[in-house]
Image (cartoon, rainbow, N blue to C red):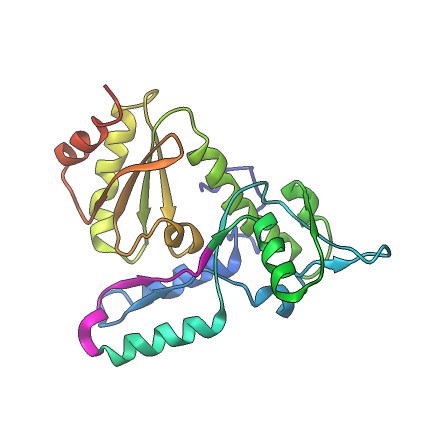
Amino acid sequence: MSGDDKRMPMLQEKYRVPHFDAKAEANAYFAGLPVTYLVTSFYWDNFYMFGLAPKKGPDGKYAWAYPMGNAKMAGIAAEDIGKVAYGIFKAGNEYIGKTVGIVGENLTVAEMGEKLNKGLGIGPVTYNAVDADAYRGFGFPGADEMGNMFQVYRDFEKEVLQSEQPVLVDFWAAWCGPCRALAPVVDEVASQYNGKLKVMKMDVDANTATPMRYGVRGIPALLLFKGGKVADQLVGYHPKDAIDKTISKVIV
């Protein structure tokens, strides 16, 4: 998202979602070192650790509000993250230089409420889908950052999955050399297919849940969407003719 994009406010003068963007900056410092990047999705534990769980009203019924619409969000239990990290260390050199993404389930907020009811027996949970600006204005600590984060998840659904045109999404990261090499090729593709194909870029460090939802395990990765589904994908650096060939499957 460019600096002049007004869809959501800039926080701390330079971030959209600080805990995502700061992680992206930190990852860049490890570029070129023998490391493994573990990319996790939303912690389900956040619901009770940060007061995001449904609240019980005067009528005894539970309800919550999020700016997510009907979009799905990738999530995982924190204890499962530890198990995966242990497995990576135990594997030795197998995952050095690789990005490992993990997700437990992809759920809408309504589906999360159903899960909570099933597990805790609290009864039906009412979901109030509010606007992102309204959520940011709730005033609790971190409301602005949380509002931006949920808006990122929601807008992917709107801009990509509900798009009338095919969409090519470039999953990249600032520390990734092949991603930087591919960037001008993607820009050329965007110019050539303007009006026929929507081209978007997503920093996997600044938005961890969406790559996990679509099984992005290595970058750069180009995912081609049509009708809300992945029609094809290319992983790693590919020349423009290979990308053109992939696009030709959805554009005559």
> x, y (%) of residue 92?
21, 79
The foreground one among 147 and 129 is 129
Q: Is residue 4 left or right of residue 142?
A: left
Q: Nearer the viewer, residue 195 or 121?
A: 121
Q: Is residue 218 left or right of residue 238?
A: right
Residue 167, given in percent of the width and then of the height, sits at 35, 32
Q: Which residues are magenta?
A: 92-105
Name the quarter where the C terminus is drawn: top left
Magenta stretch: residue 38 in it?
Answer: no
Q: Is residue 191 left or right of residue 127?
A: left
Image-quadrant location for residue 28: bottom left
Looking at the rendered structure, the number of numbered marks drawn on it comes to 0
Residue 238 vs residue 60, the one in the foreground: 60
Task: Name the residue furthest right.
Answer: 58
Residue positioned 46% across, 40% down in the render: 156
| Residue 134, quarter of the rendered image | top right
Query: Is residue 42 rendered to the left or right of residue 181?
Result: right
| Image coordinates for residue 114, horizontal then vertical, percent | 61, 54
Specify the quadrant that holds the N terminus.
top left
The residue located at (23%, 77%) in the rendering is 91
Point 82% across, 58% down: residue: 60
- The image quarter in which residue 244 lies: top left
